[in-house]
Amino acid sequence: MVNLPLASYHLGASVEVAFRYDSRPQDAVANQPVLLLSLHRESTAVDVAHKIAAFYDNDDVFSEDFLTDTVIVQVDQPEEAPAIQWADVHRLVGRGGSWHPVHILQVEDTQLPQGPYFLSPGNLLFQAWRLYPDTQDAFVSTFVPAGDDALHFKPLNITAADNLWRAVAVPSRLYAIATSEKPLAGKRISVKDNFKVAGIKTTQGNRAFSELYGPESETATYIQTLISLGAIIVGKTKLCAFASSEEATDQWIDYHAPFNPRADGYQTPSGSTTGGATSLASYEWLDFSLGTDTTGSTRWPAAWNGLFGIRITSGADTLDGVYPSCRSMDTIGLLSRDIHQLSSLVKHSFPALADGHKHPTRILYSTDFFPHLNPAQQEMVEKFTFVLEDFLGIKRTLLNIEERWNACPPVEAGGQSIRDYISKTAYYPFYYDGFQEYSEFRQEYEQKFGKPAYVGPYMRWKWDRGAEVSLEQKEQALKEMEVYRRWFRENIMASGTDGYSDAVLILPCGSGEPKYRDLPNSAPAVVPSFSPNYIASMLGLPQIVIPIGQLKFESRISKRSEYLPVVASMAGAPGCDKMLLSLARDVLDASNRPTAVQTGRFTFKL
């Protein structure tokens, strides 16, 4: 760790360099901050100034800390180095002060990325990774690459400069240049702590789990994909225990719940991709958060933290290396502050999903679940739906799924209503898997420690439900789920072809009322299978969350007016994830609505 006036840094990967000429004194200090520049024979002070100005604009790791008496240059024609008037550079950048490097070191290698580095005796050049404090308590562990193996990591184990918060290390953005092979080069991503990361422990939000098991020996397959595309994995974020539905704060027993930065800072962060959402809504230096979604675990954190989010089509990518919650409904979830960036992430990391650029011809508006209870929230969703209608040139079709079922029920339902037929269709697999997937963990823990593994009240309640479900009941429920899916395809929304869905389904998501984290939560309760949360989960649909506004309220915490994020949400046919994202992006662009959100208190500028 290196502490400089403007920030603290971790020493990243190093390379030994050779200089054509080294004017430094023999007792040169270790970890000297330096700037490495790629120049041409014709380069001038103006060219260098333009480079440095661009560094300031595009990189949060570079700063004046690296404008020292030593600068490293690499030239395309090493024998003809440019004659730079270095004293003019800082003046031309226009930031005041002065910069007078006296040691101009020309490096033999011309393949190094430009940017900030640390130079040590022995000519070791270390990458500069800036350390940021996790002030929202969103991360459970942070780490850096362990060496040459890009899929293996080592814990960072550093607190920030104030010694209060865990530090997160991020490399200079100048080291990475996006290419067709590395389209995510330099993108910083946090991952939910139910993904395996080689060399790092998984806690699953449970102290007993982390006590029993050591560091992981493999990295989840989807994370491997992200890394192969150039992404930087910076840490694991907190989740509700075993990716459940614990609410802050009284249901979070083993680990403290992260803080939602929106509004007064004391609203629920939701779950279970809790730390993923709070970190992304808080930190400009983070680009994406990776989570999972079973029954809303990405969608609801996106709504409460004012983020773009997507539940990926079930089965669109392997979940190898991800601890399960309910295998029939588990899938990957992604969060972003920018719809264009989220579209790019899904485009490149899910090549099996077809590029659906064709727009749908039907807007289905679910009257089973609308309107929202809060009229102001409902009005914002209505306005977004009007914008969607105008963009597509079609009017919404009011859809009552219950009535449609009654008009043409599947034979297997035997005349039952949809509520009755699927009343246990989500319940049985959700609670069975939630309990049985961790039977080995419970046995191994008790054998080793001579006591049962502790879980919080919510998980005890959930496991008690799961212990009562038989395998036969689960298997029957999965058959019912297939009937439900077939009926939906035949009567509501046909399966997507080539990434195209003829319809999108507007569903409610989010709350229009504050939910303070310091108030007691209601006792756990079973969510009905026929509910907006379960539509996409049971049917395997992709569903996106789109921030569309802010709702004013008077906070009892801050004693002033605050603003809750308001979102719209659309689901499409399986495999139409990219179509949903391109539709949302195009609608927002065409209507001059924001395509990106801010970090911090406000989702959008007031």
Image (cartoon, helix red, strand yellow):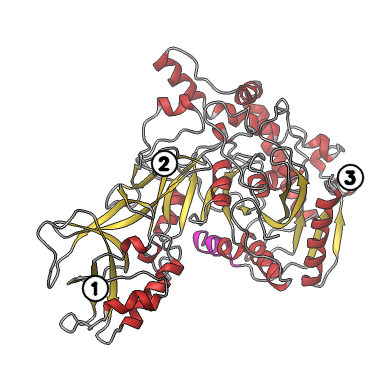
Observer-side mark, 3 or 1, equals 1
Residue, far bottom: 42
* Magenta span of residues: 344-355
Q: Is residue 475 left or right of residue 591?
A: left
Q: Is residue 490 left or right of residue 261?
A: right
Q: For mark 3, what is the residue?
A: 406
Q: Amino acid at mark 2?
A: Asp
Q: Residue at x 85, y 46 (%)?
A: 368
Task: Identify the element where label 3 is drawn.
Answer: helix
Residue 354 counted in the magenta span: yes
Task: Identify the element where label 1 is drawn.
Answer: strand
Q: For mark 1, what is the residue?
A: 73
Q: For mark 2, what is the residue?
A: 162
Residue, far left: 26
Task: Identify the element where label 2 is drawn.
Answer: loop
Q: Amino acid at mark 1?
A: Val
Residue 299 in the image: state x and y as whole percent.
Answer: 65, 48
Residue 281 in the image: state x and y as whole percent.
Answer: 58, 51
